């Protein structure tokens, strides 16, 4: 059963879904989106022996806005997630994120170290993302343009992997049209300015970096370089998959279970 409630974090009422008992896993969504991206994962992952926690970040989905308005600093999201982990009472959780969620997962691994059981960063690298920050800031003045919804839909279709059936790809893109363009653009400014490369060598928890071979948002080489900079980090390249593995892979919960088990194994062998 999936339970949903609101938690007060930094003055923001945060919408949080939870399911299952066992090893805690926090799942973080992508830019402009919400925990609905994990709708096909939460119950199945819980059935595999995990306590799955899926928040909507501030100003996303059903969560209230942050006190200062839309956030354009992913480090601020990471600090918020760290406080959420304390608020929900999680001891040494895994953190799994995609896109900005993946960058936040890397940030949390650097911040929290051994206080995490491990982190999985999908569709993310440690350096600032390849976007035009000036253009994104100008775009904040044009977020109500009628074409914005179509741009989101078509842009999402462009980064879904070639192995994903057309019907599923169109569903993913249609769901992504729900985003608030002010929030998503602010998120992308954060994506383009967030950089934790200097902290990677100090990460003390197990990490896996995952890239989709068909992802046009991030270079697999950049993701691989991020993994190479983290002690004992594992790297996975997904053929035929794009920017949204948890929405594109039909058996994602089982795949994630395998990744988390592999992260636990080195720690248990020491």
Image: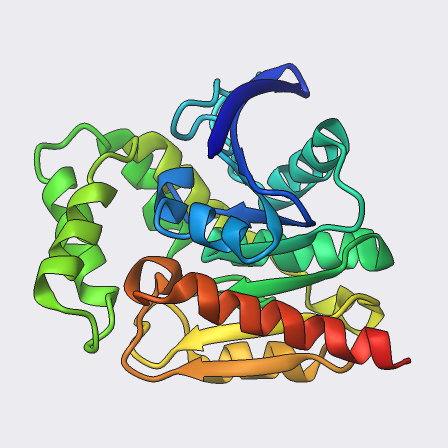
In this rendering, the answer to whether 160 lies above or below 40 is below
Q: Is 195 in front, or is 177?
A: 177
171 vs 11, left or right, is left
Number of marks drawn = 0
The residue drawn where x is 21% and y is 77% is 163
The residue drawn where x is 86% and y is 81% is 269
The residue drawn where x is 84% and y is 67% is 204
Q: Is there any visible trace of residue 66 in the rendered image?
A: no
Residue 110 in percent (x, y) is at 77, 59
Residue 117 in percent (x, y) is at 76, 59
134 vs 181, left or right, is right
Quadrant location, the C terminus: bottom right
89 vs 7, left or right, is right
Q: Is there any visible trace of residue 173 in the rendered image?
A: yes
Residue 168 in percent (x, y) is at 16, 59
Q: In which quarter of the image is residue 126?
A: bottom right
Q: Is 98 in front, or is 50?
A: 50
Q: Quadrant of residue 82?
A: top right
102 vs 242, left or right, is right
Residue 244 in percent (x, y) is at 35, 61
Q: Which residue lies furthest to the right in this view?
A: 270
In this rendering, the answer to whether 249 lies above or below 95 is below
């Amino acid at each position: 059963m999936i339970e949903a409630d609101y938690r007060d974090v930094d003055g923001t009422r945060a919408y949080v879904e939870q399911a299952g008992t066992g090893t805690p896993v926090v799942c973080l969504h992508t830019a402009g989106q919400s925990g609905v991206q994990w709708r096909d994962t939460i119950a199945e992952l819980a059935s595999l022996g995990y306590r799955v926690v899926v928040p909507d970040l501030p100003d996303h989905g059903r969560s209230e806005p942050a006190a200062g308005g839309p956030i354009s600093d992913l480090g601020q999201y990471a600090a918020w997630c760290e406080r959420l982990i304390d608020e929900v009472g999680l001891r040494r959780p895994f953190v799994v994120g995609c896109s900005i969620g993946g960058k936040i997962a890397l940030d949390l691994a650097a911040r929290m170290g051994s206080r995490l059981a491990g982190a999985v960063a999908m569709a993310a690298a440690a350096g600032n993302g390849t976007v035009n920050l000036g253009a994104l800031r100008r775009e904040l003045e044009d977020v109500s343009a009628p074409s914005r919804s179509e741009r989101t839909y078509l842009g999402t279709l462009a980064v879904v992997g070639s192995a994903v059936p057309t019907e599923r790809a169109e569903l993913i893109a249609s769901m992504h049209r729900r985003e608030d363009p002010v929030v998503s653009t602010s998120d992308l400014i954060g994506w383009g300015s967030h950089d934790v490369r200097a902290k990677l060598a100090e990460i003390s928890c197990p990490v896996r970096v995952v890239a989709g071979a068909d992802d046009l948002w991030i270079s697999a080489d950049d993701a691989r370089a991020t993994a190479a900079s983290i002690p004992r980090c594992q790297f996975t390249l997904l053929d035929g998959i794009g920017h949204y593995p948890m929405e594109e892979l039909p058996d994602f919960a089982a795949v994630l279970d395998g990744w988390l088990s592999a992260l636990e194994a080195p720690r248990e062998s020491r």
